[in-house]
């Protein structure tokens, strides 16, 4: 087997977004596209010769082919060992778990997360560092810089490696170790949660439905929820991972997880419903006919954390992304622990967790997690909820309503306008920037604007600065509107409007969020000129 050095020319569009490089499958299939990016990663991280790497993906279309290329390139670039999930499968949180447990130098995770898959769908690749978390911006910037100067890559001329059988294969001077993708992760979950309590909850007739959306969490959920916790077979639906997610859109929200939503809002609804996304790091939590917003979910988990064995000693602190509601801040205040506000993107939580400053983190985009790994973790959130339900023996809705009664309700919604022409989306953002001076201090209906800015963040651990993280309009009563362009889309631009109002009055807690936020929604459309500039009258997705 010999190392081949292949001459190539750079691509100019390999800038990682919110979470790695995401493009259409066909873009990744173009000659040298994946290879250039992988070589850029290897050149930038400069792993010592003989290092170990973790590799796995969410099983989407092109996963297997990409893994074969990466293995051959890793062998040609001096790695000594690669741990790869059986069948090329590793959920994002499981990859993080494996990197940490076996102290590998880093990991390559293949996923476009919640984006659709299949030949016409999306593919993605991201690098995770040795703490198990997404590479911070200084690393992704170095990878991008390298990609712009890429002239050649190294690859071993070798036959494909069998990925379906657990065991070791030699690839040149490197060992490929195919591992069980589920067991390390499942063991970690058993250390964090009271499986005995959850087992007896389920044995007592509590019914749940978990929708794996034909994505990566199927095998994990079957092993943990059905096998180890004893939920009846069929509690996990859409459990078989498919390369095109069964033509679905594996994004666990009220729009795309409609099959589950119909079940939990229907007759004979189960007591608990949950879903995860393409790569297993997102989660949606539902009670009988009741949706828990991700922001509320983070706050409820934080307030009840000590009920789970892994968090018995309390929380060091909480972190949330800027657009996430301040519900968690209220819990942090009551607990007397700090709450950090970071830009969107899980990579911003890593330093805080490594420094021991936070235990729980969460984002409005259906991401919740803790310092057990360095990624958000869908199934972890589901198990955390089940642990709380097993101890409190109340329904999901009752727990959330009690929470609101104690802390007040941060009424919250996000309106997404997907697939906008990039120019008009940029025009909306520019118009908002140009309006800061006029808006500040103005009265808009019953709301007085107290500040307008574009969020920037100074990392408290390494001092790195991230600017341009979203336009915030803050009102006198603590309500907020945030405008932000998504960093994960692959077609045109997606503009997100995040709306939040604080409601301490219990008699108004029953209101539907869209009703309670109606005035703020009108203000958002008015100040952004969104309808005029994009021609869109309705959001694509409301969560
Ligand atoms: C990724 C990031 C998350 C982020 C989300 C939304 O999630 O890991 O931290 O909140 O994108 O990003 P955006 O609003 O820029 O689309 P995932 O689940 O896609 O990896």
Image (spheres, grey):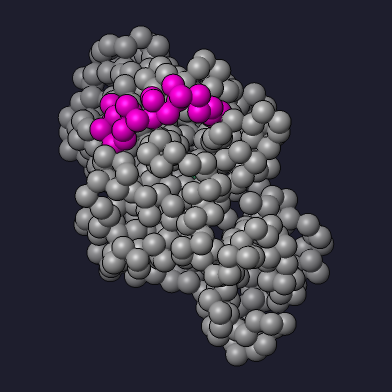
On screen, residue 525 versus residue 160, left or right, reads: right
Q: Nearer the viewer, residue 201 or 477?
A: 201
Quadrant assignment, res 36: top left
Q: Is residue 197 magenta?
A: yes
Q: Which residues are magenta?
A: 187-211
Q: Residue at x 54, y 64 (%)?
A: 410
Q: Residue at x 25, y 46 (%)?
A: 312
Q: Residue at x 69, y 57 (%)?
A: 512
Q: Residue at x 58, y 23 (%)?
A: 237
Q: Nearer the viewer, residue 135 or 132?
A: 132
- Quadrant placement of the N terminus: top left
Q: Position of residue 273 (x, y in %)?
A: 56, 34
**Can residue 72 be seen at all in this image of the molecule?**
no
Q: Position of residue 351 (x, y in %)?
A: 28, 56
Magenta: main secondary structure: helix
**Up-down relation of residue 123 to residue 196 (above or below):** below
């Amino acid at each position: 087997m010999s190392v081949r050095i292949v001459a190539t020319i750079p691509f100019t569009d390999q800038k990682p977004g919110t979470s790695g490089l995401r493009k259409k499958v066909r873009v990744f299939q173009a000659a040298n596209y994946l290879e250039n990016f992988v070589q850029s990663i290897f050149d930038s991280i400069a792993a010592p010769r003989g290092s170990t790497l973790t590799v796995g993906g969410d099983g989407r279309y092109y996963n297997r082919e990409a893994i074969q290329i990466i293995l051959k390139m890793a062998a040609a670039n001096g790695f000594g060992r690669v741990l790869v999930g059986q069948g090329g499968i590793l959920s994002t949180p499981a990859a993080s778990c494996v990197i940490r447990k076996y102290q590998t130098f880093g990991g390559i995770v293949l996923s476009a997360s919640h984006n659709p898959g299949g030949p016409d769908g999306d593919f993605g690749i991201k690098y995770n560092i040795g703490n198990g978390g997404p590479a911070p911006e200084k690393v992704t910037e170095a990878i991008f810089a390298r990609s712009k100067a890429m002239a050649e890559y190294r690859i071993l001329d070798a036959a494909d490696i069998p990925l379906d059988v657990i065991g070791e294969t030699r690839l040149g001077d490197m060992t490929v170790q195919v591992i069980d993708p589920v067991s390390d992760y499942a063991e970690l979950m058993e250390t964090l949660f009271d499986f005995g309590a959850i087992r007896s909850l389920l044995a007592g007739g509590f019914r749940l439905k978990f929708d794996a959306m034909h994505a990566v969490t199927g095998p994990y959920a079957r092993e943990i929820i059905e096998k180890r916790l004893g939920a009846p077979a069929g509690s996990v639906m859409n459990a078989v991972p498919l390369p095109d997610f069964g033509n679905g859109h594996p994004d666990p929200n009220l729009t795309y997880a409609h099959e589950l939503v119909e079940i939990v809002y229907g007759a004979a609804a189960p007591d608990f419903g949950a879903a995860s996304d393409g790569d297993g790091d997102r989660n949606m939590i539902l009670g009988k006919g009741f949706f828990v917003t991700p922001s509320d979910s983070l706050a409820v988990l934080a307030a009840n954390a000590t009920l789970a064995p892994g968090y018995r000693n309390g929380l060091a602190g909480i972190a949330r992304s800027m657009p996430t509601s301040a519900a968690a801040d209220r819990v942090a205040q009551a607990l007397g622990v700090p709450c950090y506000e970071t830009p969107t993107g899980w990579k911003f939580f890593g330093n805080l967790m490594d420094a021991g400053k936070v235990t729980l983190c969460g984002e409005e985009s259906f991401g919740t997690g803790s310092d057990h790994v360095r990624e958000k973790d869908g199934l972890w959130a589901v198990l955390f909820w089940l642990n709380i339900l097993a101890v409190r023996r109340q329904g999901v809705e009752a727990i959330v309503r009690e929470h609101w009664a104690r802390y007040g309700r941060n009424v919250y919604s996000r309106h997404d306008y997907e697939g906008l022409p990039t120019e008009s989306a940029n025009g909306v953002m520019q118009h908002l920037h140009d309006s800061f001076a006029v808006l500040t201090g103005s009265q808009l209906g019953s709301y007085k604007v107290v500040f307008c800015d574009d969020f920037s963040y100074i990392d408290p651990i390494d001092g790195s600065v991230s600017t341009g993280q979203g336009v915030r309009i803050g009102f006198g009563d603590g309500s907020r509107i945030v405008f932000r362009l998504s960093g994960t889309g692959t077609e045109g631009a997606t503009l997100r409007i995040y709306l939040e109002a604080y409601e301490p009055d219990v008699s108004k807690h029953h209101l539907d969020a869209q009703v309670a936020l109606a005035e703020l929604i009108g203000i958002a459309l008015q100040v952004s000129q969104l309808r005029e500039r994009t021609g869109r009258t309705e959001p694509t997705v409301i969560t």
